[in-house]
Image (tube, helix red, strand yellow):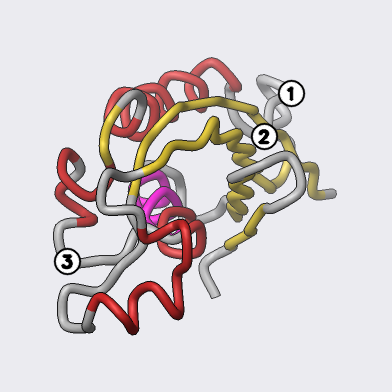
Amino acid sequence: MKVTVSRKAHFNAAHRLYRKDWSDEKNDAVFGKCNNPNFHGHNYDLIVSVTGEIDPETGYVMDVKVLKDLIKLEVEDAFDHKNLNVDVPEFQDLNPTAENIVVVIFNKLRSHLSEKLEMEVTLYETPRNFVTYSGQ
């Protein structure tokens, strides 16, 4: 019997969507106002879901406090109140779109979990725009 446990988190960050190898005109055409050279920000919401068998001794799939601490260390401390393009090494050469951010978050967390556990990460860039990644 598999069960999914989830932890919700939040961080605020600025970014600019653009490609260094494109002209200003092409960046404007593709990314529009998200290409603002002075950056723009979002209040991101994050849901990390872990699926696995219930441990018969503890009754847990995973201790949610452990998940909370992992998210704080790997995501909130690394991204909150940061300029993703400038302050976060993973985005030095990677456009910080919601799609790329969710994959980076997934990869930062995945290595800390047992291989027996499945994980899915959902990132809300706005209340209506969100992306989900489960490693595939």
Return the residue nearer the eye: 66 or 95: 95
| Depicted 55 relative to depicted 94: above or below | above
Prevailing secondary structure class for the magenta stretch in the rendered image: helix
Residue that mark 3 sits on? 93
Front in this rendered view, residue 123 or 66 = 123
> Residue at 76% of width from left, 48% of height from top?
128
The amino acid pointed to by label 1 is Gly
The boundaries of the magenta stretch are 103-111
Mark 1 or 3, nearer chain start: 1
- Measuring from the top left, give residue 15's x and y in whole percent: 34, 47
Q: Residue at x 30, y 23 (%)?
A: 77
Q: Residues within 10 Å of mark 1 (few under 14, many from 20)?
A: few
Q: Nearer the viewer, mark 2 or mark 1?
A: 2
Question: Please, is residue 41 above or below residue 65 in the view?
Answer: below
Quarter assignment of residue 133: bottom right
Tell me the SS state at disc 1: loop
**Magenta highlight on residue 105:** yes
Residue position for label 1:
59
Helix, strand or loop at mark 2: loop
Q: Which residue is at 23% across, 50% downward?
A: 85
Marks 1 and 2: in contact by CB < 8 Å?
Answer: no
Pointer 3 local density, CA inside 10 Å: few below 14, some 14–19, many at least 20: few
Quick check: marks 1 and 3 in contact, CB under 8 Å? no
Rendered image: mark on residue 61: 2
Q: CA distance from mark 1 to mark 3?
A: 43 Å
State which tag comes first along the sequence, 2 or 3. 2
Vertical order, 105 against 25 (above or below): above
